[in-house]
């Protein structure tokens, strides 16, 4: 009710429309067959005969009962406009748009009906009713209020709709829609394609290419009656339709990726369409009366070629967006090595996840001020953590990487990035919370007081049971200990339906790095009951300021509170060495959103509930709370929602590069069983 109270003007017009439908019975029988239709309907004949009131009266009637569904739905644009800009503005757009659409259409048909144009002569005799001119103007004005890049996308969809409808179905209403939208387009000037990004220019080309292919097939299967003439169903140019559809399927994805070859072939085919149309028109003007019968459907060919001409102009205009090379490296030469990355970390420091950028599987892009580590997955360039280098260089590194990725036809995004990188991405980028980094501050850490009971108890119990804690490096341990660690890890992985994960989750291979520390819990019998791996966190100047928890593995049947014991003992050990922080890594899907977070919080809670039986994110979060950490939010940064499906596919492949379809299916069944449980 509160929402309805905000759109009184829209509701009033809808009610008037329904009242007229009840009084004149248009809700259940065709109004165009009634005697009243000629009195209230607008159009060139009505104005020519002096029925000046018809542009107003015709607004509140609908010609067919089923059209009420679409007419009332079209008022959604006015409602949105009224909520955003108020009732007076919404009414002004509706009234001016409706009157302009009716009068401009009448004037247009008055002029062109004097020419040999059959379509103009036919529509000059037509009458129409309905509020669609006003509602289309409101929809166009509402589109102008969208945030970028959705504003440009919505404008192109709206313009595509009115142009295609006019070219191929060409009723008087379609002409009125075109004039209403054109009025707002030129009055508001909210469509600024020249300001779009390279990615957006490619996306527009991709959508237009697919649309042209779909139109080619649709016009063969359905009748048309547009500005170039009439066609019957299944009576069109099959060869043209097949070629257009083939171009759309073969070249569209190449256009989306910015490939030069796709641009060149599409431009060539567009030129071919335009040349064919020009030749047909020339033959017709020179007396080729049989042109239509010998070349297929003349009217559809001309209309389609007109669309290809517009597409050709656009492709030539944004030609610089199509220079991407397959598998092109990103960044400035020379390409950085792992040693360069480690040197950057030692010299300038990094975040709690930065050491993961040294792992196998990452590529590196050199910027003017630093290095960006990323993985190329499913057409997405996924940056891991924050750019490396001096803090002041981060905005420049972010901007340079985004530009390089887009020019290479990749979707850029930043995964597990911090607040500083979030502030450095372009305005308009979106962010999603992917985890909360759990950080324990080590200076002055004492396991005293009631809140440390569980940790203190595990340390005391370990002493009573003569457990041994050892901080070491994997390469320094004897073969027997290494084999125990491998056996524990393989047993843990064997219980999972999917292979061991990667990207931000290390394995024993990554633990072999001499800068990675290993914490062991050894029983009196010499068995390893559990172990942890700790990644270094550099603070600049070659100083290690802390460590990040990576591997957590325990032996079945071993010391029960081994994880609490290992983390507590590690915290003491690193504190004695002078370390400042201990990161227990991110806690996915456990972020505490504010009360007004809305759908994002609901989606996160649902995902956490579904995945809990398999991955135990909430259980892990509760375990980490025993160490009373502070939280630093980690984000997924991306351009807009249109990229999310590709990013999801890319992240899935980054975490599970070796997983098979069968393993994914098995994991899905396990999730479903867990959800039912």
Image (cartoon, rainbow, N blue to C red):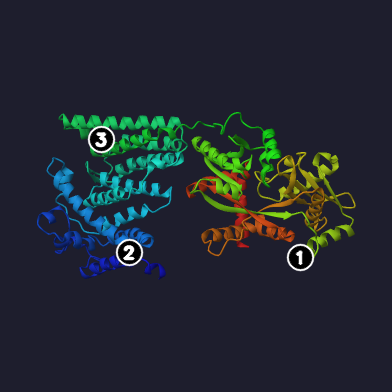
The residue identified by callout 1 is: 451
Callout 2 crowding tier (Cα within 10 Å): few <14, some 14–19, many ≥20: some
Find disc 3 in the rendering and name its residue: 296
Query: Can residue 290 be seen here?
Result: yes
Question: Which comes sooner in the sequence, label 1 or label 3?
Answer: 3
Of 262 and 320, which appears nearest the observer?
320
Q: Earlier in the sequence, mark 2 or mark 1?
A: 2
Q: Is residue 393 left or right of residue 264?
A: right
SS at mark 3 in the image: loop
The answer to which of 128 and 364 lies nearer the viewer is 364
Does residue 62 lie above or below 530 as drawn?
A: below
Percent across and percent down for residue 641 are 49, 50
CA–CA distance in space, label 2 to label 1: 58 Å
Vertical relation: 21 (above or below) 220: below
- Looking at the picture, how far across and down is residue 509, in whole percent? 73, 40
Query: Percent position (x, y) of residue 426?
Result: 51, 45
Say few, some or many: other residues with alpha carbon within 10 Å of mark 3 (under 14 / 14 to 19 / 20 or more): some
Q: Report the mark closest to the observer, 1 or 3.
A: 1
The spot of residue 517 in percent (x, y) is 78, 44
- Give the farthest residue toward the left: 49
* Residue at point 35%, 31% (across, down): 269
Q: Quadrant of the C terminus?
A: bottom right
Instruction: Give the Cα distance between marks 1 and 3.
Output: 83 Å
* Residue 87: numbered disc: 2
| Residue 29 position by quadrant | bottom left
C-alpha distance separating marks 2 and 3: 51 Å
Residue at x 76%, y 47% (from the top left corner): 533
């Amino acid at each position: 009710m509160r929402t309805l109270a905000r759109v009184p003007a829209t509701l009033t017009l809808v009610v008037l429309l329904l009242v007229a439908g009840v009084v004149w019975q248009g809700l259940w029988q065709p109004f165009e067959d009634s005697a009243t239709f000629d009195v209230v309907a607008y159009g060139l004949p009505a104005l020519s005969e002096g029925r000046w009131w018809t542009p107003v009266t015709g607004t509140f009637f609908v010609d067919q009962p089923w059209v009420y569904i679409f007419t009332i739905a079209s008022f959604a644009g006015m409602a949105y406009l009224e909520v955003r800009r108020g009732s007076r503005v919404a009414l002004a757009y509706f009234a001016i748009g409706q009157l302009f659409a009716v009068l401009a259409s009448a004037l247009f048909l008055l002029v062109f009906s004097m020419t040999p144009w059959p379509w103009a002569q036919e529509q000059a005799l037509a009458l129409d009713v309905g509020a669609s001119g006003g509602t289309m103007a409101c929809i166009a004005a509402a589109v102008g209020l969208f945030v970028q890049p959705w504003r440009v996308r919505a404008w192109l969809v709206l313009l595509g709709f009115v142009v295609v409808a006019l070219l191929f179905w060409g009723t008087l209403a379609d002409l009125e829609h075109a004039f209403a939208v054109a009025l707002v387009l030129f009055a508001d000037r909210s469509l600024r394609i020249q300001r779009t990004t390279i990615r957006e220019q490619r996306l527009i080309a991709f959508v237009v290419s697919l649309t042209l292919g779909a139109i080619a097939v649709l016009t063969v299967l359905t009748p048309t009656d547009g500005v170039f003439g009439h066609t019957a169903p299944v009576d069109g140019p099959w060869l043209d339709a097949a070629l257009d559809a083939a171009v759309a399927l073969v070249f569209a994805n190449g256009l989306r990726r910015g490939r030069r070859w796709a641009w060149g072939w599409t431009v060539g085919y567009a030129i071919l369409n335009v040349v064919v149309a020009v030749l047909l028109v020339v033959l017709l003007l020179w007396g080729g009366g049989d042109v239509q019968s010998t070349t297929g459907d003349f009217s559809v060919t001309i209309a389609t070629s007109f669309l290809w001409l517009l597409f050709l102009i656009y492709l030539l205009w944004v030609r610089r967006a199509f220079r991407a090379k397959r598998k092109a490296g990103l960044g400035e030469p020379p390409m950085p090595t792992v040693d360069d990355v480690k040197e950057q970390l030692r010299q300038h420091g990094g975040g709690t996840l930065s050491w993961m950028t040294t792992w196998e599987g990452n590529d590196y892009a050199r910027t003017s001020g630093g290095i960006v580590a990323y993985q190329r997955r499913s057409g997405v360039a996924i940056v891991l953590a924050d750019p490396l280098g001096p803090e002041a260089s981060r905005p420049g590194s972010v901007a340079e990487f985004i530009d390089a990725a887009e020019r290479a036809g990749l979707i850029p995004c930043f995964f597990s990035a911090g607040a500083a990188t979030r502030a450095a991405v372009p305005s308009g980028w979106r962010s999603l919370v992917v985890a909360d980094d759990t950080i324990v501050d080590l200076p002055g850490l004492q396991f005293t007081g009631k809140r440390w009971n569980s940790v203190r108890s595990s340390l005391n119990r370990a002493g009573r049971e003569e457990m041994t804690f050892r901080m070491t490096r994997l390469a320094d341990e004897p073969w027997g200990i290494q084999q125990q660690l491998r056996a524990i890890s393989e047993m843990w992985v064997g219980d999972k339906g999917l292979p061991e994960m990667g990207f931000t989750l290390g394995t024993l291979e990554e633990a072999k790095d001499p800068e990675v520390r290993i914490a062991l819990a050894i029983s009196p019998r010499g068995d390893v009951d559990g172990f942890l791996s700790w990644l270094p966190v550099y603070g600049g100047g070659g100083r290690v300021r802390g460590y990040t928890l990576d591997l957590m593995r325990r032996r079945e049947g071993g010391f029960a509170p081994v994880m609490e014991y290992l983390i507590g003992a590690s915290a003491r050990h690193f504190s004695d060495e002078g370390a400042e922080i201990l990161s227990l890594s991110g806690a996915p899907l456990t972020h505490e959103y504010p009360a007004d977070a809305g759908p994002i919080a609901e989606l996160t809670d649902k995902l956490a509930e579904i995945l809990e039986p398999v991955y135990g994110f909430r259980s892990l979060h509760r375990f980490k709370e025993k160490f009373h950490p502070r939280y630093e939010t980690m984000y997924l940064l991306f351009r807009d929602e249109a990229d999310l499906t590709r990013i999801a596919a890319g992240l899935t492949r980054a975490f599970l590069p070796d997983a098979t379809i069968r393993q994914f299916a098995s994991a899905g069944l396990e999730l479903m069983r867990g959800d039912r449980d």
